[in-house]
Image: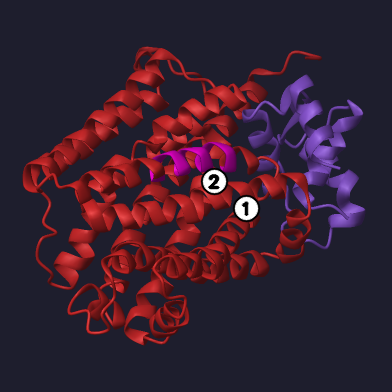
Amino acid sequence: MMPMNYAILKLFEDGQTYDADSVMFALQDNYAGFRAFKKANVVESLMAAEKNDLLEQASYDLDELGELHIYYRATEYGASMIKSYIK
Amino acid sequence: MSNSPSPQAEAAMQNLRSRFFKKGVILAIASGMIYGIFSACITQGMAVGPWADWYGDNTVGLSTFVIIYVLGMLGSGINDLVSSLWATGIAGVRGKFMDFLRVLKTKPGLVMIVCALIGGPLANSSYIIALQLAGPIAATISALCPSIGAIIGRVLFKQKLNLRMGCGILICLTASSMIGSLAFTSVDVSSNFLLGLLFALIAAFGWGFEGAVGGYGTTLIDFQISVSIRQSISGIVTIFFAVPILCAVAGNIGLWPMLFGQAISSPAAMIFFVASGLCSAITFAFWYKGTSMIGAALSMACNGAYSFWVPFFCWLILGVLFGQEGFALLPIQWAAAVIMVIGIFLIAINPLDIFKKPKEA
């Protein structure tokens, strides 16, 4: 089992786009028991990864409840960093 | 991009980005302030109990080498050991202890360990030795670390550093130099003093490297885990390797258990190390987190205001609270603080944006 932050970034290796909710859905089997497994933490991890050019924004919009969803994908640089640093 | 987002979505997006940016700036500024409290606590911790004798009457007959180098390293190491207990304790309470152990075995964990060694034993001890040799100007010289960190961030991670940000960093450095100029007029420029400046520069490089690389690493590693690694590695290596080696170089390895034992068994000193350890756990956590959120250049400029916060909190805690003399702040230091705020503001915000029509919230 890898550290939670690694698992969040590792998801993006498949080239797909994910928002915080879909990240949490994909990781819930292994990480739902973690105290740090909260949406606010996942949102900040994704935004920090974007700030550092590992991820880039793919799209965003509001859902019917007025909640913002930002979808990210790995940048070329980010994909190579994730592949090389997170085994 | 798929479909165009609605204006409401765009407004929500701007709002989220703005909150994220402000949080990063606040964390980076707070890290510099807490560093000031840390400096006051460790200065006081190394002035009471056995430290008072070692640096004062020296009844045990320590050599000059031991007083300058070994004691500085010992103080830094004890602080980091105590801080590692705080940091791993906080990470444990937040449910991250197992992740802390997992990260240690990975490549980013190894990078963080290297960062800890450079920013920890190397830079910390250099800073404390510089404080002993050159006085408070060490804090000012070591505040060069924002520009070093910004350059490292730019070279290694292609982080943005435009002309406006460069001007802001220059203004911050000018403010630091204003405070530093005081030391040159009030202190004899002896060879010890110049050696102190050299150590302060080594500290600046170490922290610049650490801020850029460690802050970037926090994109991969949770910031509380990063700090736990940093303080644990730094504390263990300093106390159990660096200090004994220096004692051996001083010609008496038996000094190590004697000094370490006396220092940690002094409640009068340890109470301040407990406080300084907590402050360093928090200041590094905020620094790493802030850097991952707003980049090395801005984060380190905000954090670099510690060259004002250190004398400010030394004056407040040691001067006002404990009634010690020699910590009063001069008008030029207050003026430098205002100039630093202008510099940080310039790095953070394009002044021309203020005159643009605000977007709908």
Residue B20 visible, this orientation: no
Determine the colour of chain A: purple
Residue B15 visible, this orientation: yes
Q: Is residue B335 above or below residue B98?
A: above
* B209 lies left or right of A67: left
* B229 lies left or right of B252: right
Q: Is residue B199 above or below residue B8?
A: below
Q: Main secondary structure of the magenta part?
A: helix
Q: Are marks 1 and 2 on the same chain?
A: yes
Which portion, as a residue range, is magenta? B203-214
Residue B67, magenta (yes or no): no
What amino acid type should be assigned to the residue bearing mark 2?
Tyr
Rendered image: mark on residue B226: 1
Q: Is residue B157 above or below residue B247?
A: above
The residue at the point 81 percent across, 41 percent down is A86
What amino acid type should be assigned to the residue bearing mark 1?
Ser
Do the residues under discs 1 and 2 have CB atoms within 8 angstroms?
Answer: yes
Q: Nearer the viewer, residue B172 or B338?
A: B172
The residue at the point 38 percent across, 66 percent down is B70
| Secondary-structure class at tag 1 | helix
Q: Nearer the viewer, residue B133 or A60?
A: B133
* B188 lies left or right of A87: left
Identify the residue position indicated by label 2 in the image: B288
The span from disc 1 to disc 2 (Cα, nearest Å) is 8 Å
Q: Is residue B159 above or below residue B290?
A: above
Determine the colour of chain B: red
* B63 lies left or right of B221: left
